[in-house]
Image (spheres, rainbow, N blue to C red):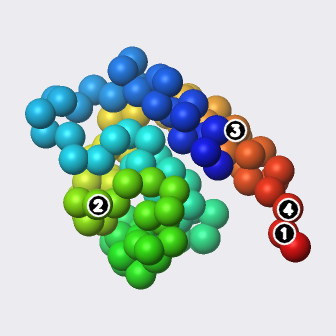
Amino acid sequence: MIDFIVSIDAHSDELDGRQCWKIRYPLSTILFLVFVCQLAGIESWKEMEDFIEMNEGLLGDYVDLSVGCPSHDTLERVMSMVNPQFLSDLKVEFEQSADCLSVE
């Protein structure tokens, strides 16, 4: 999963259209959290926010949540700004990286 986050960070300059002085969460953090929520079967932004808050300790091992969890409004706003084709390609890459993990 670390490779997934690194690949997002490598493209963040070209993909992240947010005003840099307003950014509290890197694009990689938002995308990672949304994809994890989707894998958990969560579909609404509010449910994603609740899931992230309930699993903040675990998710914080993978991404920086030192300023707290992003709100459902933040999740939705950031996701609406990202190119849909990039999201589709990234989701496939994420799922492939998750498949590589072995459960013992």
Q: In this view, does 79 lie above or below 37?
A: above
Mark-to-mark CA distance, 1 and 3: 19 Å
Residue 102, x across and y down, in percent: 85, 62
Task: Assign the C terminus to one quadrant of the image.
Answer: bottom right
- Between residue 22 and residue 103, name the one nearer to us: 103
Amino acid, disc 3: Glu
Q: Label 2 near label 3: C-beta < 8 Å?
A: no
- Mark before the other along the chain sequence, 4 or 3: 3
Q: 10 Å neighbourhood of mark 2: few (<14), some, or many (≥20)?
A: few
Mark-to-mark CA distance, 3 and 2: 26 Å
Residue 103 position by quadrant: bottom right
Mark-to-mark CA distance, 4 and 1: 4 Å
The image's mark for residue 102 is 4
**From where the camera sits, is residue 34 visible?**
no
Amino acid, disc 4: Ser
Q: Label 1 near label 4: C-beta < 8 Å?
A: yes
Residue 54, x across and y down, in percent: 41, 81
- Residue at position x 18%, y 30% from top? 20
- Between residue 41 and residue 50, name the one nearer to us: 50
- Mark before the other along the chain sequence, 1 or 2: 2
Residue at the spot of label 2 = 66
Residue at the bottom extreme, as displayed: 54
Residue at the top extreme, as displayed: 14
Mark-to-mark CA distance, 2 and 4: 29 Å
The image's mark for residue 103 is 1
